[in-house]
Image (cartoon, helix red, strand yellow):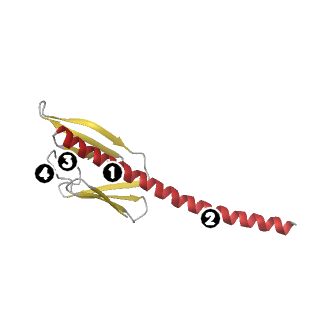
């Protein structure tokens, strides 16, 4: 009787350890997908605003790209940069970096599709992990995810 209870407890412990590992991988993938979707949404919104309003839009990082982005535009009447929208992310365990053709500090979307300056890529990785997901942004503002 005691041996049967001990065997059941050992099996239960093994199943618990396997479940915890599976949930860890699930949460990792879920967090990664949320960040990818947030970046994709910000890029698409900036592109649409540039085409709709007929003026150039710029995405810049808040403090770093990991903490969020800010969409701004130059107002031709006041000649001042106006903030239009801000995305702020709460993912302290993730690092987001931008490498662009024109600049590593901003992404510019022009109102004319022939003059777009947004060619580059984001790399998203967890702190302490060297493997990164790459989010490629072509000069037309299309987003492609490379895992």
Q: Secondary structure at mark 3?
A: strand
Q: Position of residue 82 (x, y in %)?
A: 21, 35
Left or right for 24, reference 14:
left
- From where the camera sits, is residue 107 visible? yes
Closer to the N terminus: mark 1 or mark 3? 1
Say the numbered circle drawn on residue 40.
Answer: 1
Q: CA distance from mark 2 to mark 3?
A: 47 Å
- Image quarter of residue 88: top left
Q: CA distance from mark 1 to mark 3?
A: 14 Å
Q: Quadrant of the C terminus?
A: bottom left
Q: Secondary structure at mark 2?
A: helix
Q: CA distance from mark 1 to mark 2?
A: 33 Å
Check the image and report above or below for 47 versus 95.
above
Residue under the point 28% across and 47% down: 44
Q: Which residue is mark 4?
A: 115
Q: Position of residue 117 (x, y in %)?
A: 17, 53
Q: Which residue is mark 3?
A: 109
User: Of discs 2 and 3, which sits in the foreground?
Assistant: 3
Residue under the point 42% across and 58% down: 127
Q: Quadrant of the N terminus?
A: bottom right
Q: Position of residue 17 (x, y in %)?
A: 64, 63
Q: How many residues crowd mark 2 within 10 Å: few (<14), some (14–19), many (20+)? A: few
Residue under the point 24% across and 44% down: 48
Q: How many residues crowd mark 4 within 10 Å: few (<14), some (14–19), many (20+)? A: few
Tell me, yes or no, whether the two marked residues, 4 and 1, touch with CB atoms within 8 Å: no
Name the residue nearer the viewer: 120 or 126: 120
Closer to the N terminus: mark 3 or mark 4? 3
Q: CA distance from mark 2 to mark 4?
A: 52 Å
Closer to the N terminus: mark 4 or mark 1? 1
User: Of discs 2 and 4, which sits in the foreground?
Assistant: 4
Closer to the N terminus: mark 2 or mark 4? 2
Q: Which residue is mark 2?
A: 18
């Amino acid at each position: 009787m005691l041996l049967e209870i001990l065997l059941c407890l050992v099996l239960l412990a093994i199943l618990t350890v396997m479940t915890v590992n599976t949930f860890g991988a699930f949460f990792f993938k879920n967090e990664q997908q949320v960040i990818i979707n947030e970046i994709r949404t910000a890029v698409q919104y900036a592109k649409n605003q540039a085409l709709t309003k007929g003026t150039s839009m710029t995405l810049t990082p808040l403090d770093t790209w990991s903490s969020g982005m800010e969409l701004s535009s130059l107002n031709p009447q006041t000649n001042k940069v106006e903030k239009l929208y801000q995305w702020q992310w709460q993912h302290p365990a993730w690092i987001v970096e931008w490498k662009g053709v024109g600049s590593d500090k901003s992404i510019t979307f022009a109102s004319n599709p022939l003059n777009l300056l947004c060619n580059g890529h984001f790399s998203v990785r967890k702190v302490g992990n060297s493997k990164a997901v790459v989010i490629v942004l072509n000069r037309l503002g299309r987003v492609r995810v490379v895992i």
